Image (tube, rainbow, N blue to C red):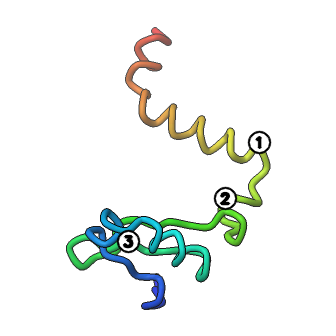
């Protein structure tokens, strides 16, 4: 993953000044928040980033259902018995 240095914000800076992170995401489409000198979080401007914004409702539902099934797989297997 290539990261433009204009998009980098430290986690401590993000905690102190969230508006700076939002401005970074506004101007660059995204802000990468670093923790312990490694990229940890990604804040995106949904209007600029097609990663999520362009998904159909069906695609969003599929993503959510996969997460739920993965998280609660043992419970679903037990219920299926």
Task: Give whichever of 60, 8 is nearer the camera.
Answer: 8
Looking at marks 3 and 1 on the same chain, the residue that comes earlier in the sequence is marked by 3
The residue that appears at 57% across and 67% down in the rendered structure is 44
Determine the secondary structure under disc 1: helix
As displayed, is residue 34 above or below residue 66? Answer: below
Q: Position of residue 74 (x, y in %)?
A: 38, 24
Q: Where is residue 53 in the image (x, y as percent from the top left)?
A: 72, 59
Q: Where is residue 1 in the image (x, y as percent from the top left)?
A: 46, 81
Looking at the image, do the residues carrying marks 3 and 1 touch, with CB atoms under 8 Å apart? no
> Position of 26 compared to 79: left or right?
right
**In the rendered image, which residue does mark 2 sit on?**
52
As displayed, is residue 73 above or below residue 3? Answer: above
Q: How far apart are marks 3 and 1 (CA)?
A: 30 Å
Task: Give whichever of 15, 61 is nearer the camera.
Answer: 15
**In the rendered image, which residue does mark 3 sit on?**
33
Looking at marks 2 and 3 on the same chain, the residue that comes earlier in the sequence is marked by 3
**In the rendered image, which residue does mark 1 sit on?**
58
- In the picture, which quadrant includes the C terminus? top left
């Amino acid at each position: 993953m290539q990261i433009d240095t204009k998009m980098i914000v430290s986690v401590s800076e993000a905690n102190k000044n969230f508006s700076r992170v939002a401005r970074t995401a506004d101007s660059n489409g995204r802000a990468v928040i670093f923790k312990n000198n490694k990229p940890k979080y990604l804040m995106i401007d949904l209007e600029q980033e097609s990663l999520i914004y362009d998904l159909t409702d069906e695609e969003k539902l599929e993503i959510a259902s996969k997460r739920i099934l993965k998280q609660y797989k043992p419970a679903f297997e037990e219920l299926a018995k």
